[in-house]
Image: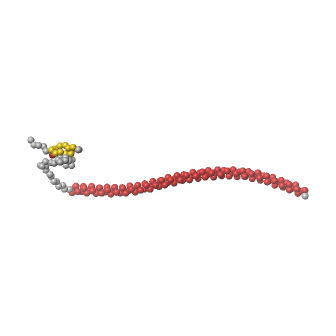
């Protein structure tokens, strides 16, 4: 009976044993110090690229370059948009501050208008009082002037 050749492969921190014929490069890794038996065969393959494959590779490369160019363009646009966003954010903050200042100024102006309205009403009341006094004085002066006229008439015949 022939012996099946086995090999130890890494399995986590330990190893396991598989048939040498089941070993696959890239999928398995030999365990420390393990070697293949001497009758293993090494095959060298040369692979050529067909014109069809080269054309597909060239198309894929051109598409990649196009995508990279678009990516660069989009990154540039994004940076521009971020700069514009920052500028607009700064402008909004400035306008908010200006709005607060204008609201405070408006409140001060309203208070000034209230005071002026109050002062105006007080002055109008004073004007009415003075007009009433002036009417009384005018009436009193008219009586005095009439009395003087009457007195003057009365005094004229005596002379």
Task: Left or right? Give the position of 6 relative to 157.
Answer: left
Residue placed farthest to the left in the image? 1
> What residue is drawn where x is 54% and y is 53%?
102
Image quarter of the C terminus: bottom right
> What residue is drawn where x is 37% and y is 57%?
76
Nearer to me, 20 or 33: 33
Task: Left or right? Give the position of 142 relative to 117.
Answer: right
Q: Position of residue 129 (x, y in %)?
A: 72, 50
> What residue is drawn where x is 41% and y is 56%?
83
Question: Which color scheme is applied?
Answer: secondary structure
- The relative height of residue 84 versus residue 10 in the rendered view (above or below) is below
> What residue is drawn where x is 25% and y is 57%?
58
Q: Position of residue 96 (x, y in %)?
A: 50, 52
Residue placed farthest to the right in the image? 159
Q: Position of residue 14 (x, y in %)?
A: 21, 43
Task: Left or right? Give the position of 13 relative to 70.
Answer: left
Q: Position of residue 5 (x, y in %)?
A: 13, 44
Task: Left or right? Give the position of 114 relative to 77.
Answer: right
Res 111 visible: yes
Indicate the quadrant where residue 66 lies: bottom left
């Amino acid at each position: 009976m022939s012996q099946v050749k086995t090999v130890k492969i890494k399995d986590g921190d330990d190893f396991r044993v598989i048939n040498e014929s089941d070993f696959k490069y890239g999928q398995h890794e030999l365990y420390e110090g393990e070697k293949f038996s001497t009758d293993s065969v090494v095959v060298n393959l040369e692979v050529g690229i067909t014109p069809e494959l080269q054309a597909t590779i060239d198309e894929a490369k051109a598409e990649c370059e196009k995508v990279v160019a678009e990516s660069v363009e989009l990154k540039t646009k994004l940076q521009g948009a971020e700069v514009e966003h920052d500028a607009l954010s700064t402008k909004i903050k400035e306008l908010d501050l200006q709005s607060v200042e204008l609201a405070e100024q408006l409140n001060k102006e309203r208070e000034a208008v209230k005071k002026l309205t109050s002062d105006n009403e007080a002055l109008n009341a004073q004007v009415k009082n003075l007009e009433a006094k002036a009417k009384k004085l005018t009436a009193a002066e008219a009586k005095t002037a009439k009395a003087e006229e009457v007195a003057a008439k009365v005094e004229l015949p005596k002379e």
